Amino acid sequence: IQPQVQIQKAQDLAAAGLIDDIIHLKNQKAYVFASPKDSIIKPPSSDKLVEFLQAFLDPQNIKFENKFESAHGFLTLDYGASCNLGFLPWLLKCNHDQAGEILKTFYNLPMPRATAIGKNLFGFDQSEFGNAQTPLYKNGWIYIPDSCQKGERCSLHMALHGCQMNPDFIQAQFAEHSGFNEWAEGNHLVVVYPQSAKLGTQNPYGCWDWFGFTGPDFVTRQGPQMKALKSMIDRLQGN
């Protein structure tokens, strides 16, 4: 990975109108996690990602967490596989609230972590947002706090799972146990959990498309999964 090449590519795509104008990134925030013990995504890869982000974001708006030692996965306080070993469900019991760190990076959360309410996690049909080539699993999940169901104004967070974390591998565990819902309940925050799907030998692990299995436009606004996710956001916002 060469950050300067990717930076130029982003600039070229923006100039061609294939992605939004990168000037909109200037005041955005980013959270990057990299464990020095991760044997799958090596720390230098995350260093290069931060270098890429620094070309477009204010460096003060980038939270780079790279000291916590864990295996590859999504860190939780008390749910999942061993923190040092890592495996399915790729949620790691590390006594570390990664969902909280992510949300606090992006939002002003006036209330502390609370107890999630099981009945506030709903399944939804994803078929209207794509087709076999998108691809999406048949259903996703959405957590809607009591306050939001009563009509109060709420923010929206979209949480994307990792590879081998869709229902074929871990059922609803990411939506139920990642930790986002506990923060959402008291902070007027709706969390939607879209689910990618396996696609033959092109995407056997149900990853989201970060490597081009849906076609060469996967990284642009015309990418099948990009369009699907945007459609979900538009639907939730009433657009």
Image (cartoon, rainbow, N blue to C red):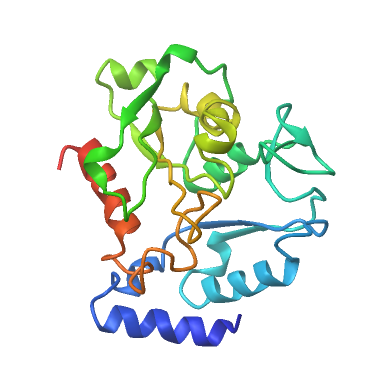
Q: Residue sitting at 42 percent across and 83 percent down?
A: 9
Work out whether residue 144 can be spotted.
Answer: no
Q: Residue sitting at 47 percent across and 28 percent down?
A: 184
The image quarter containing residue 63 is bottom right
Work out whether residue 239 can be spotted.
Answer: yes
Position of the C terminus, as image quadrant, is: top left
Q: Nearer the viewer, residue 238 or 147?
A: 238
Position of the N terminus, as image quadrant, is: bottom right
Please tell me how many numbered marks the rendered image carries.
0
In the displayed structure, does residue 67 sit left or right of residue 174? Answer: right
Q: Position of residue 97 (x, y in %)?
A: 67, 36
Q: Residue sitting at 79 percent across and 50 percent down?
A: 68
Q: Nearer the viewer, residue 75 or 224?
A: 224
In the displayed structure, does residue 156 sit left or right of residue 184? Answer: left
Q: Position of residue 121 (x, y in %)?
A: 43, 21
In the displayed structure, does residue 151 sit left or right of residue 194? Answer: left
Q: Position of residue 194 (x, y in %)?
A: 40, 40
**Residue sitting farthest toward the left:** 239
Q: Residue sitting at 52 percent across and 58 percent down?
A: 30
Q: Nearer the viewer, residue 232 or 29?
A: 232
Q: Position of residue 39 (x, y in %)?
A: 79, 59
Q: Is residue 190 above or below residue 24?
A: above
In the displayed structure, does residue 98 sit left or right of residue 152? Answer: right
